[in-house]
Image (spheres, rainbow, N blue to C red):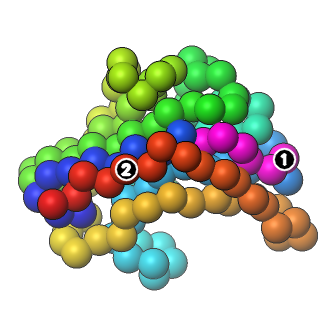
Amino acid sequence: AAATGSIVARVTSVSNTSANAKAGVMVKQSTTAGSPYFLIADSPSGLIKVQYNFNGSKTSLTEPFPNGWMKISWTAAGKYTAWLSPDGVTWTAVLSKTLTIAPPSTVGLFECSHNAGALGTATFDQVSNTTP
């Protein structure tokens, strides 16, 4: 990611292809498999997940599905924070981690069906990226 910035999106739908299906916003070192990442995602059950670097996660049941607003913000020191909001105005921090994701990195929306036999879909709105 850049020195500081954020990405915001509202997940308006996620196909129910698996109990672990999810869609949300992510910062990842690159598109290379196994590269460091930080994400926040909504699932068809309404479970919110924050995951990072394949070895850590936190779940929260505080956001209804659909239409959960999600944000990731980051600092020049590598502190990544996942946020939730019911309305895109009032935000609550879910989890912060300091990670080594050096510029340039990939920032955007993602969807994961978590089912090798089923293509997943998701829809988003209210997307903004404040990466300088």
Q: From the image, which quarter does the N terminus lie in? A: bottom left
Residue 103 position, x and y percent, is: 19, 71
Residue 33 position, x and y percent, is: 51, 78
**C-alpha separation, residue under disc 2 versus residue under disc 1:** 25 Å
The mark closer to the camera, 2 or 1, is: 2
> 96 above or below 115?
above
Q: Which mark is residue 128?
A: 2
> 108 above or below 84?
below
State the image quarter where residue 89 is shown.
top left
Q: 10 Å neighbourhood of mark 2: few (<14), some, or many (≥20)?
A: few
Residue furthest out toward the front: 126
Residue 35 position, x and y percent, is: 41, 72
Secondary-structure class at tag 2: strand
Task: Please state if 96 lies on the left or on the right of 48 as rendered.
Answer: left
* Span highlighted in magenta in the image: 11-16
Indicate whether residue 99 is drawn in magenta: no
> 57 above or below 90?
below
Q: Which residue is mark 1?
A: 16
**Prevailing secondary structure of the magenta residues:** strand
Task: Please state if 78 lies on the left or on the right of 51 as rendered.
Answer: left
Q: Is residue 107 visible?
A: yes
